[in-house]
Amino acid sequence: MCGISGIVSLNPNKVSRERLKNMTDSIAHRGPDGEGHWLADDQRVGFGHRRLSILDLSESANQPMHFADRYTIVFNGEIYNYLELKASLIQKGYHFKTTSDTEVLMACYHEKKEKCLQELDGMFAFAVYDKVERTVFCARDRFGEKPFYYTIQDKQSFLFASEMKALWAAGVARESNTTMLYNYLTAGFLEDIRDKKVTFFKNIFRLPAASYIYINIDTLEIVEKEYWDIDYLNTDEAISLDGATQKFKELFYTSVKRRLRSDVPVGSSLSGGLDSSLVVSVMDDLDQQQQINRKTFSAQFPGFLKDESVYQQMVIDHTHVDPHFVQPTEHSMLANLDKIIYHQEEPFGSASIAVQYEVFELAKHQGVTVLLDGQGADEILGGYHGYFLAYFNELEKANKSNFKKQWEAYQKLHQHNLINSADKQNRNWKTSLKSKISLPVKKQLKTIYRKINPLDNRIGLQTDFAATYRQSAFQDSADTNNLNAVLYHSTRVHGLEQLLRYADRNSMAHSREVRLPFLNHELVEFLFTLPASFKINAGWTKYLMRHTFEDLLPKEICWRVDKIGYEPPQQKWLQNNKLTEQLIYSVDSLVQHRILDEQKARILKNKGLKNLDHAIAWKYLMAASLLNKNLAVPQQVAV
């Protein structure tokens, strides 16, 4: 796990070690264990690297790495199936000098060029220089776990890096994308779903997930292609539940085994929910001889309705791990907020990101470098309560009799659910379910199910600003008559990649690596072939997972009814006096930039920001931070 940067330029004067070092210094937190810089002979290409040592801790695995007197690579991520790939390559005559996955990746690229991507089980962003073909090849993993940003300067230079701050360190202008800002403030969009390359900053782009680009060194011509997608409409109606259970278990255990490969300590996050509990339980099952670092890291909120400490303790008692806890508060969030904003670079959805930040900080203090986590399960297995709408839409059209039975089962199961309760008084099932989507379980689901009205100005935008960007309002849509279509939308179109960005920045802020067993592509492809009833059934989300692992998990967790989205008491936190002061500063800043209406702001401040919706308050904080062009590293940022 590392930080990468590079420059490809028609002008050799634009490529220098000094410039590369400025870039890598800005992302030193991603790789505190070493650094390297390399220039091609003609000085038209330069690579920079910061290393976090995970596999092969020796200096021989340092980067930039060279191969076959032809290729040079900078690589951020992990290739989890590198041992299997290496064995196959050795049979074909390849020889290796290290025990790293980086060298295996280079051999794979040498053998198959871009087609090697199809064989990789991993998270990655990398660039390969080929001095024979005069190209630089850049690629990103299927789900977007690892970041890759780039810009083109004066039609002469292509610059890339793991984080945008490295581009700014190279002299790239930091100018806010006001179209993105408008859509964030009005509808909460954190990405442009029409063009996944767009960021919150003008002329800075991200390489979309499951994509690669070839750069011609002599012309700077760029060719971009998507190399992978999910066929979510090809459903296997013949598969049995037992058959699906066996296959799911086999794929998931394989995924966890591969993600345990490491030369440094491996632990796990533990929220108390179904997903992280399963990861911890499978790790425990695989570790009969107790050879894995068995530390877990959890956040607790004593006295809060959505505190999950009782469920965390069930898993701890069940697996006998070594647990560690942090209790985030509004004070710790306030102390960390500037640092989190600095690392995240773009707006983030809620205070839950501050909680995640503290969990990774705890892992650092305990000396655990790698953490397994349950992220991704909700999107591929139908875990969010909002997915019930698509499920029942699909069911009503296919089989009205079964629909009635399933709807009654749902109402019965959730009638006492304090978090995601069923509204038995509402006879219109669609209205009842839609009322649940507004819960802050997963905010991006809102845009799937409701039409966005650009004339809606509850945020209090300045008239000219709203009029300028109203025609640029994003419209999100998904086939809400098909569960797989909505899951695909969350996985590949709008939702999951935002969460992966949060996890990458928060973990790397503390030089930690997070690995996600649910995002093995073979597992994901398999789950998308299954009928909707395998994912949602009798009122249960993630039905297949519960059925498959009911003998492994504590019963109270396996068949837990409520769903909590890693949620702290944000509304209470934002009432803190110092946070109120920061909110007032944010409001004033938005007025000065002619984004927020001055009269609206005056009314808010006269009331001391009382009764301000906490979701809108959070948007004010994020928007103001985006406009702050102070690039100074906040004090105590982890490096």
Image (cartoon, grey):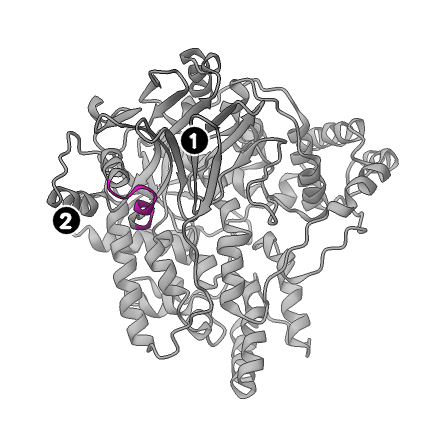
Residue type (three-letter) at the residue carrying disc 1: Asn
Q: Residue at 55% of width from left, 17% of height from top? A: 171
Please state the horizontal and vertical placement of residue 201, each as a whole percent of the image: 62, 32
Task: Tell me how far mark 1 sits from mark 2, CA to CA.
Answer: 52 Å
Q: Nearer the viewer, mark 1 or mark 2?
A: 1
Magenta span has 243?
A: no
Q: Which residues are magenta?
A: 111-118
The quadrant where residue 599 appears: top right
Mark 2 residue crowding within 10 angstroms, few (<14) / some (14–19) / many (20+): few
Magenta span has 112?
A: yes
Question: Where is mark 2, residue-wise?
Answer: 289
Question: Where is mark 1, residue-wise?
Answer: 216
Q: Residue at 42% of width from left, 65% of height from top? A: 528
User: Which one is in front, 48 or 46?
Assistant: 46
Quadrant into which the C terminus falls:
top left
Please state the horizontal and vertical placement of residue 230, each as a whole percent of the image: 43, 59
Please state the horizontal and vertical placement of residue 256, each as a whole percent of the image: 28, 51
Mark 1 residue crowding within 10 angstroms, few (<14) / some (14–19) / many (20+): some
Quadrant into which the N terminus falls:
top left
The quadrant where residue 395 appears: bottom right
In this rendering, the answer to whether 570 lies above or below 446 is above
